[in-house]
Image: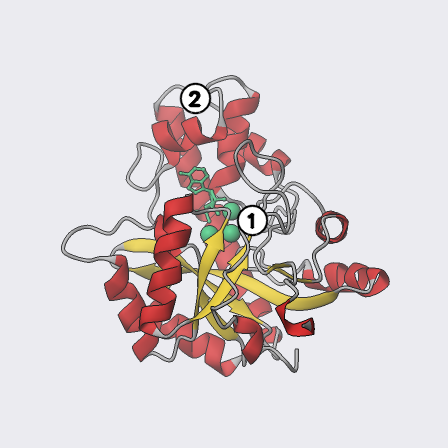
C-alpha cells in the first residue's frame, strides 16, 4: 500500500547559521543523499539559513519545511522547543537580533570564567569558529577547547566546564514556555518539544510535568526518535506520545559528524502506528 511505505524524514538539523558545521545547502545535500524526502532545518534561535536551504531543497526536488529551535526557560533549566512551518518569519528575525546580543554578552562572560581558570582568549577563538558570528553558542567554546587540546572531546568540554551549572556556565534568560507558545502561535508555527528525554529537572519536577504544561498551552507534538536520545528514550517517548496524545516528530539533531550520532535522516524511524506532526503541516 502506498501509505505504508516508510517515508524518510528529518525534522531537526543544524547548519552553520547556528552551531552546525555545514552550510544550509550542504546540510540539505547530505539529507538528500541519505534518502530524506521531507526535511526541516532547525537552527537555534535563527531563521537565517532557511532561504538558502529551501532553494537547495527545491533544486533537489525535496520537500522543505521551515524550522527554528527556540531556547526556552522552564523549571529553572533551558529546554528547546522547535517551531515547524511558521508562516510569519519576521518576528523570528527580531527575536534573533535580541538574542544575538544576549549570546554575545554571555560569550564574553563565559570567556572571563575561562580566564579565571587560566584558559585565555576563548572568546576570540569561539568567534573564529562560529559560522554565524551573531549566534555564538556554547558549542563553539567546546570546539575551541578541543582545538587547543584543553580537552579531548566536545563532550568532555561540556562535562568539565560548559554543562548547566558547570564552572564556565552562564545562565541566560530565554523566554519562558508561556511566551514561547504565544510566539509560536502568533507566527503560525507548530510547536514541538525537542528531545524530551534529554532534560534533567530538579526533583520534584519531571519531564512529564513539562509535557503536561506544554499540552495545556496548546502544544501538539514531541520528538519521539531523535539523535539526541538513547534507544531506550526513543522507546519511552513512543509510549508517552501515545498515552498523552501527542503527534510524533523525528530528527537527527545533526550538527556535523559526531561518533555515535546519526547522520542526516539516519536517526531511528518513527513506528508506523504513531500519527506524525506532518498532519499539521500539510499546507507548508
Ligand atoms: P547554547 O544554545 O549556546 O547554550 O548551546 C547549546 C548547544 O550545545 C546545544 O545545542 C548542543 O549543540 C550543545 N550541547 C549542549 N549540552 C551538551 C552536552 N552535554 N554535550 C555536548 N554538546 C552539548
Ligand atoms: Mn546545538
Ligand atoms: Mn536541542
Ligand atoms: Mn538541536
Q: How many marks?
A: 2
Among all residues in the image, which is located at the extreme front? Answer: 1
Q: Tell me what residue is drawn at x 33 percent, y 48 percent.
A: 171
Decide if ligand 1 comes within 8 Å of the CB at mark 2. no
Residue 167 higher or lower than 271, as above or below: above
Instruction: Sort mark 1 into few (<14), some (14-19) or many (20+) by Cα contacts within 10 Å.
Output: many
Give whichever of discs 2 and 1 has the lower sequence position.
2
Q: Quadrant of the N terminus?
A: bottom right
Q: Position of residue 56 (x, y in %)?
A: 80, 59
Q: Position of residue 168 (x, y in %)?
A: 36, 34
Q: Position of residue 20 (x, y in %)?
A: 61, 44
- Does residue 205 appear in this view? yes
* Residue appearing at x 40%, y 39% in the figure: 109
In the image shown, does 52 or 251 lie closer to the viewer? 251
Work out which quarter of the rendered image holds the C terminus and state it.
bottom right
The residue where tag 2 is placed is 119
Answer with the quarter of the image where residue 216 lies: bottom left
Badge 2 marks a residue whose secondary structure is loop
Of residues 161 and 27, the one nearer the viewer is 27
Q: Which mark is residue 267?
A: 1
**Label 2, label 1: how far apart the Cα atoms are:** 36 Å
Let me know if residue 174 appears in the view: no
The residue closer to the viewer here, 211 or 68, is: 211
Q: Nearer the viewer, residue 6 or 129?
A: 6
Q: Position of residue 214 (x, y in %)?
A: 33, 72
In the displayed structure image, the side of residue 28 where residue 44 appears, left or right: left
Q: Residue furthest left?
A: 204
Amino acid at each position: 500500500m502506498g501509505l505504508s511505505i516508510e517515508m524518510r524524514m528529518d525534522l531537526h538539523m543544524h547548519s552553520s547559521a547556528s552551531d552546525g558545521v555545514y552550510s544550509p545547502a550542504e546540510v540539505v545535500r547530505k539529507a538528500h543523499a541519505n534518502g530524506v524526502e521531507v526535511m526541516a532545518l532547525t537552527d537555534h534561535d535563527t531563521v537565517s539559513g532557511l532561504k538558502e536551504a529551501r532553494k537547495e531543497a527545491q533544486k533537489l526536488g525535496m520537500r522543505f519545511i521551515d524550522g527554528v529551535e527556540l531556547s526556552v526557560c522552564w523549571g529553572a533549566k533551558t529546554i528547546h522547543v522547535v517551531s515547524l512551518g511558521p508562516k510569519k518569519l519576521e518576528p523570528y528575525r527580531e527575536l534573533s537580533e535580541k538574542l544575538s546580543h544576549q549570546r554575545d554578552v554571555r560569550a564574553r562572560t563565559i570567556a572571563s570564567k575561562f580566564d579565571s581558570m587560566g584558559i585565555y582568549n576563548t572568546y576570540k577563538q569561539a568567534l573564529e569558529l562560529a559560522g554565524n558570528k551573531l549566534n555564538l553558542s556554547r558549542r563553539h567554546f567546546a570546539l575551541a577547547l578541543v582545538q587547543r587540546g584543553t580537552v579531548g572531546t566536545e563532550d568532555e568540554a561540556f562535562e568539565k566546564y560548559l554543562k548547566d551549572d558547570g564552572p564556565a556556565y552562564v545562565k541566560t534568560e530565554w523566554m519562558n514556555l508561556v511566551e514561547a507558545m504565544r510566539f509560536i502561535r502568533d507566527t503560525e508555527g507548530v510547536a514541538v518539544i525537542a528531545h524530551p528525554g534529554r532534560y534533567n529537572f530538579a526533583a520534584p519536577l519531571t519531564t512529564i510535568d513539562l509535557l503536561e504544561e506544554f499540552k495545556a498551552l496548546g502544544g501538539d507534538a514531541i520528538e519521539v526518535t531523535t539523535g539526541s536520545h538513547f534507544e531506550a528514550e526513543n522507546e519511552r517517548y513512543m509510549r508517552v506520545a501515545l498515552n498523552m496524545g501527542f503527534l510524533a516528530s523525528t530528527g537527527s539533531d545533526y550538527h556535523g559528524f559526531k561518533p555515535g550520532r546519526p547522520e542526516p535522516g539516519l536517526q531511528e524511524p518513527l513506528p508506523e502506528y504513531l500519527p506524525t506532526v506532518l498532519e499539521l503541516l500539510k499546507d507548508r
